[in-house]
Structures are given as structure tokens and as C-alpha cells.
Image: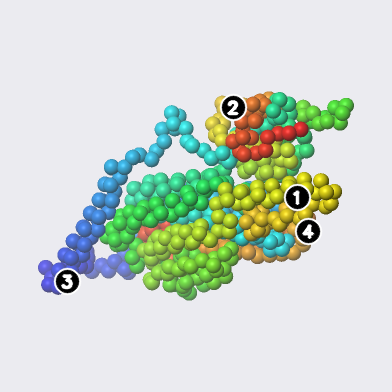
Amino acid sequence: MSQDQNKNSQVFEGMANIGKGMATVMKHFGRKPVTLEYPEVMPDLSTRFHGRLALLTKSDGTDLCIGCKACAKVCPCNDLIQIEMHRDEDKKPVIDQFTIDKGRCIFCGNCTEVCPVDCIKMLPDFELSGYSREELVLDKHDLTLTGEESDEWRQIRGMNPHVE
Amino acid sequence: MTATDVTTPQIQIPGVSVEQDTDTEDLVVNIGPQHPSTHGVLRLITTLNGEVVKEMEAVIGYLHRSKEKMAEGVSYFQYQPTIDRVEYLSSFYDHYAYVTAVEKIAGLKVPKRVEYIRMITMELNRITSHLLWFGTFLLDLGATSPFFYAFRDREEIFKIFEDITGARMMYNYYRFGGLNNDITPGWLDKVRYFCDWFPDRLDEYEAIVNKNPIVMDRTIGLGLIDRELCMKYGVTGPNIRAAGVPMDLRKTNPYCCYDEIEFDVPVGERGDVYDRYIVRMKEMRESLRIIRQAIDKIPGGDAAEVEKLRQAVAAKEEAAKAKAKETGEKPEPVPPINPDFEFKGQKINLMTYKPPAGEAYTTVESPRGLLGCYMISDGTPKAARVKWRGASFSNLAALPELMIGQLYPDLMAIFGSLDVIMPEVDR
């Protein structure tokens, strides 16, 4: 009857191991839940988070963008960033329109990296949904931050303050 | 009742042998282009005799996004974010293969600090990938809790990644000859804390699964892969290591700084589904061991210390300039900080970057196996050809042969154990 004994010991061993596993599962009862109650509690995001795109301005609130279109050139989504600009009498660039379709944006961060004046940046803001596709197309007014916001953001990211 | 009756219960029908005499037709089951427990969109045309698989054909291509052709139409830097989408569970590896291919063609020198940061991020990425595999594999077998545990702990690593890359899964962090940005101050401490915290969690997983008789009954001796089969189909990664072949590019062809790090290559004995599970669990511990050593050895140490050095050099330069202004002589050259402490090598303009004409093939040991990137550059800002060698494709190719003669209910155990990810198969 050695085979029977063998079988019995196998059964006991199996039961012991299942018990060990279940005890581990039971440990979780005593633990704090890890889920975040999102709308009430906002997640703590990194300052480098790839979220909403924004155009920083100078401290007095005037445009920082020089219209070089570097961001449009490195964007992996075709024609996602569209810039219309002209030059005034002093040959200084004036941005007429700056459009980003965030519905097509893949939030890779390429544009923020090549910007020569550190104008286009990504903010740690992830609530970007809208009710229609047209709503997702952001124009210059939606994208531009005020002077104070820009200064605050530059401080958070440890960037140099803007100087003329 | 004798002892043999207990161990091998059999239903005996007088005059009929189950093997030969059942005069039944084969049944073709189309396991449609979504089910195989949704590791991706895969279609398996299966011919069944009763419950036994007679033949199996895998139909792939449902997730084809022409990632290779895409590289020929956009610049080198523009293509980089789309690599994340080739294999989204361990995209640091794809980036590494791509970036090193460009570095090899252009002969760019990479600072040592960069290599170490790449190594730490890649090993953490291996843990996230194996954790997801652990969760979904046991979900395939019918266990639900490990899935939640694995995803909970995976989130901790994602937080670590988010700190430096700004994204949880689509990192886009490596650059030609460097990194997008240096690590943040205190990041290494976070990783060290994770390395101390995580082994307890691994112990918990192993307590639940390792000796569980249900898991053992369903996995031991199932889906045997041997050395010959691996060579026939090009199966790599933990699958070949479970077959007892210690093939690991980190040991055999050390890239990054793996030759300065001590670690073992876990191998299995039988090459069955259970061994593949054990090998992956052991690999996670080895990854932690590598990360711990890398944190201690990283040139420059924490980002705050490197920043202090940079500021000291800048202050010295300014003092030298001021002195030169007074005396009217040329400013004295100030020794820069150790180039190994930088997070970027040679400065390049990413927008118009073009490596010289040439070709390169780089390989990396990804969590799924050998990942290769073959690149031909013709000296223009766009690559002439980029070819990916994904490990999942070869691993999936072995599935039809593995399944012949196996029971249909074992399909998910065997397929799950191969750790196939469909976006990498189809690209």
C-alpha cells in the first residue's frame, strides 16, 4: 500500500500549500486599499508629465514663440501643429494662429524638446476630453498661458527665468 | 479495489478503443481573431479530433501598422515616438536597439552615466513586463488574484518611470548618444527603495503559485520545448532558457555595462510551462540584483550631486572670465566635469540629424527574447530601411508544433507561457 501512502502525502502536501497560498491572499484584508478615488483625490503627477500642451509667454504676457516651426517639423503626426505668422515693420515675428489638434496628438514630447526658446511645453494636466472633435482642436488663445502662469511653471520645472 | 485503479482511473467501453475505433469527423474550430485570451488579435485555425489538437495554423497580421515602412518616410527623430508602439510592454528595449543602431552607424560615443541609466531603466522595464506576464498567464489558467497583485506592483515602477520620462508606458526617453533628460534628484533613492520593497512581494507571489498543486498539475510536463525546436524556429528569451540553454545576450554579448555587473542566468531543466514560469520569476530577482549594483556604480551618483559639479564648473568659468577682463588676457581654460557624468554625449541637432551612410544591426535581450534592429542609412535625414526582429514572432511560430497532440484546454496554458505580444508580431 506504499502507493496509497504516497498519494495521501501528496494530498496533504497539496492542501498545506494551498493553505499557505490562501493565507497570503488573506493578508491583503488587513492592508490599505491602493486604489485612488480619482475625481476627489487627484494623482500626484511628475512635473515632467506629458500632458496638455501649452505655449509659455514672457513675464509680461507677450508671445514667446518665434514661429520657427521646429515643433511642426519633428512632430510624428502629420500636420498636427499648424502655425501662421508674419513679420512686422521691425522684422519681428508675429504669430497669427497656432493650432494643435490634441485629438490626434500622441503626447510624445518631441516638440517640447526642439523648441529653441522653451516656449511649447507639456503641463501635468490629463483631463483633456471634450464633447466633440472640433472642441479638441486648440487655437492660440486656448494654448497660451498668462505671464504669471508661465513664470510659475518655469520655476516648477527649474528653467531659467525669461530674459530679453 | 487495487492500487492501480486509484492512480489511473479509466472509462472502459467494451469493444471500443478510444484511440482508433471512434469513427468521428475532425472538427475545425476557428479561435477567432480576438480570443486567445486577448494577448492581442490572433486567429488560430485549429483542427480537433475530440479534444486533441491535430493541426493548428496561426493567422497573424491583424495589427499590422507598417512600422518598418513608416521609418522610410519620416526623419530619424520623428520616427522615435512610434517605436514605443511596436512593443508597448517593454518599449525601452526597442528604443535601445534603435538608438544604438544609429550610434553604431554614426560612431557616437555614449557617456557611461547614460549607459548605466539605460541599464537601470531597461531592467525595471523587464520587471514590469514579467509582472504583466505573471498576471495574465495565471489569468489564462483561471486565477484572478495574481492579476490584481501584479498590476498593483507594476504601478510602482510606472511611477518611477513617470518621474524621469514623463510617461507611464510610451517613454521616448533615449536619444542618439544620450538621453532626453538627466534623472531627477532623489530618483536613485526611489529605485533603491523599490528594490528593497519588491522582493517581499515576489515572495508573496511565489507562496501563492509556486507549489500550488492545481498550477503544478496543469503546467508540469506540458508544452515541452527542447533545444532543437528552439533552433528550428528561433525561439529565444526565457523560453529557450527554460529549455536549459543559457542563451542570454547580456552574458554572451555584453552590451551597455553588463560586463561590469555580476548576475546569474537562470535556466530550467525540462523546458515545460512550469519551468518557463520559474525562469521568469527568477529573472525578476536577478534584475533587482543588477539594478542594485548599477545604482551603486553609476558615475556621478545622484542628479543633485552632478548638478552641483556643473554649477561649480560654471562658477569657475565666470571667475576666469572676470579675471581675464581685468587683465585683458584670454580667460584660462577651466576643466569641464568628467564627460562620463554627462547625460548627453556629442551635441546634435535632432531636427536635422543625419548619420553617415552605412548599415548596422544591433541586438538586445528583451524580456521576450532577442530583439534586433537592422538599419541602413543612405546619408539623408530619413532612414533607407529599418527592419525589426521581434522575439514574439519567432516564439509564436513554434506554437502550432507545440500544440500538436495536446489537449485543447491546454492551449491557453501553452500559449500564455510563451509570452507573445501581438503588436510586436505584426508591427
Q: State the mark number for residue B379.
A: 4
Asked if badge 4 and badge 1 are on a common chain, one would say yes
- Picture layout, residue A120 above or below residue B320: above
Q: State the mark number for residue A132.
A: 2
Q: Nearer the viewer, residue B335 or B353?
A: B335
Asked if badge 2 and badge 1 are on a common chain, one would say no
Note whether residue B276 is visible.
no
Rendered residue at 38%/72% (across/down):
B269
In the rendered image, residue B349, in percent from the top left (x then y), is placed at 74, 50
Residue tagged 1: B320
- The amino acid type of the residue labelled 1 equals Ala
Rendered residue at 45%/45% (across/down):
B155
The subunit carrying tag 4 is B
For the image, the number of numbered tags is 4
- The amino acid type of the residue labelled 3 equals Gln
Rendered residue at 73%/52% (across/down):
B348
In the rendered image, residue B337, in percent from the top left (x then y), is placed at 66, 56
- The amino acid type of the residue labelled 2 equals Ser
- The amino acid type of the residue labelled 4 equals Gly
SS for dot 3: helix
Q: Quadrant of the N terminus of chain B?
A: bottom left
Mark 4 in CB contact with mark 1 (< 8 angstroms): no
Rendered residue at 64%/42% (across/down):
A109
